[in-house]
Amino acid sequence: MTTEGRALRRIFCAVELPAGLRELVAARAARLREAFPRVRVSWVRGESLHLTLKFVGEIGPARVADLSEAAGRAAAGAGAFGLTVAGAGTFPPHGPPRVLWLGVEDVSGGLARLNRRLEDECAAAGFEREARAFSPHLTLARPRDPRDARGLAAAHRETPFEPQAFNVNELIVMESELAPGGSRYTPVSRHPL
């Protein structure tokens, strides 16, 4: 797609995960995939795991630059903080599962503050605020037919995930390119906290 002759880019703001944590989450996904081979699921690749703070959608190159500047201002006023990945659940919490996720604990409130700053700076730059409340999580998988995934979802919720703490010291503006093997994510700009 294009706007005024320029290609649109699918953009979001995120926090990257450490490689070791991505490997642990990928191993969990592999175990679930092996236990439920007949359930049709789109699994998030380990190298693609991230924590989305704001999904913007398709925008033109000039707006990508505006978003990067807003993200830079948001990050400049925020300090580094710690998070913990712990707990497992599904969206919606009852009924056929559409998303399998791992929880993110923000004990210090640093992630919530960064999210608010990002929303404020983006709004000042003319981007719409997110209508839904911020609910930090790591998406593990999306069942293609939620009705067939109840057993998988139950196993996911009931299998403990050893809490994993990590530090956040950077906000990233990312581009998502849809591909047959799953989305590919490329950093557009990095902003230290």
Image (tube, rainbow, N blue to C red):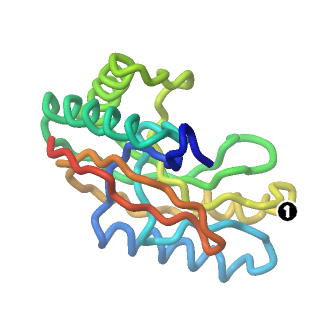
Q: Secondary structure at mark 1?
A: helix
Q: Is residue 45 left or right of residue 94?
A: left
Quarter-wise, where is residue 23 in the image?
A: bottom left
Q: Is residue 152 above or below residue 103?
A: below
Q: Residue furthest front?
A: 5
Question: Where the C terminus falls, by quadrant?
Answer: top left
Residue plotted at (66% across, 83% down): 34
The residue that mark 1 highlights is: 148
Residue 167 lies, in percent from the top left, at 20, 52
Q: Is residue 151 left or right of residue 70?
A: right
Q: Residues within 10 Å of mark 1 (few under 14, many from 20)?
A: some
Quarter-wise, where is residue 157 in the image?
A: bottom right
Q: Is residue 170 left or right of residue 132?
A: left
Amino acid bearing label 1 = Asp
In-front residue for pair 146/16: 16
Residue 29 lies, in percent from the top left, at 56, 72
